[in-house]
Amino acid sequence: GAVVSQHPSRVICKSGTSVKIECRSLDFQATTMFWYRQFPKQSLMLMATSNEGSKATYEQGVEKDKFLINHASLTLSTLTVTSAHPEDSSFYICSAPTGYTDTQYFGPGTRLTVL
Amino acid sequence: AQSVTQLGSHVSVSEGALVLLRCNYSSSVPPYLFWYVQYPNQGLQLLLKYTTGATLVKGINGFEAEFKKSETSFHLTKPSAHMSDAAEYFCAVSNDYKLSFGAGTTVTVRA
C-alpha cells in the first residue's frame, strides 16, 4: 500500500514553544491530507483538512490560530502547534487518500509531550 | 451525518478462538466502511474496506467483514485468533474522504 511518513515520531517541548510536525506522502501525490489527534485510550478525532494550494479547513472547536497547517507541496503537509501547553500533549496522526480510491493511508503518528 | 458505533470497548479471546468485533453505522448515503488496526504508539493500518459490490470483504491477516445493509452493520471476524492480533481496532465510515471513527475495541488474546 501507499506510504505516509511523519516526522518527528516523538517530541518533548516546554510550555509556550511551537512545534512543527511534518507529514509526507512518499510514493504518491496528495492534494488533500488530514490531521487527527488521539488522546490516550481514545479514538481519533479529525482536526482539519489540509489542502494543497489553499487554506486548511478546520473542524468545529479546533483553533486555527493554534494549529497552523501548511500544505507546501503535493507530498508535504505540516502542522505547527503554536504556544503549546500541556493540554496539547497528544498523539497526532496524519493521513492521505491516494486519489482514486476512498482509502486513507496513515502516518505512524507523532507523540507530543508539552512540559 | 455519518457515524459508527462499536459495541464493546474490550474483547478478550483465547488463542485459536473466533474473534468478533461489532460495528454499526449510520449514514444517509451508501456508506464506505473501513476497519483499521492500531498497535501501541503506531499509526493505523487498513485491514479491509467496503465500498460497493460484494458484501463479504476479505482483508489482511485473515480478517473479514460483512456489510449488512438491513442491519446497518459491518462486523469484523477472524476464525482463529493469534497472539499478534492483540491491538486496538477501529471501525470507520467515510464521507468525502473524511473518516469518522468508532470509539475503538481493544483485543487481548489469552494463551
Image: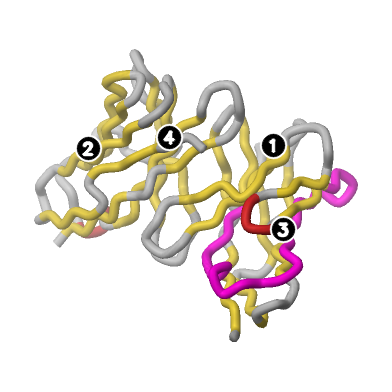
Q: Residues within 10 Å of mark 1 (few under 14, many from 20)?
A: many
Q: Secondary structure at mark 2?
A: strand
Q: Secondary structure at mark 3?
A: strand
Q: Secondary structure at mark 1?
A: strand
Chain for numbered disc 4? A
Residue appearing at x 58%, y 60% in the figure: B89
Chain for numbered disc 3? B
Q: Which residue is mark 2?
A: A80
State the mark number for residue B76: 3
Chain for numbered disc 1? B
Identify the image quadrant of residue B18: bottom right
Q: Which residue is mark 1?
A: B32
Tell me how far mark 1 sits from mark 2, CA to CA.
31 Å
Q: Nearer the viewer, mark 1 or mark 2?
A: 1
Q: Residues within 10 Å of mark 3 (few under 14, many from 20)?
A: many
Q: Are marks 1 and 4 in contact (CB under 8 Å)?
A: no
Q: The residue under label 1 is which amino acid type?
A: Tyr
Asked if badge 2 and badge 4 are on a common chain, one would say yes
Residue appearing at x 39%, y 21% in the figure: A51
Q: Nearer the viewer, mark 2 or mark 3?
A: 3
**Which stretch did the figure color magenta?**
B68-91
Q: Nearer the viewer, mark 4 or mark 3?
A: 3
Tell me how far mark 1 sits from mark 3, CA to CA.
15 Å
Tell me how far mark 2 sits from mark 4, CA to CA.
14 Å
Q: Secondary structure at mark 4?
A: strand
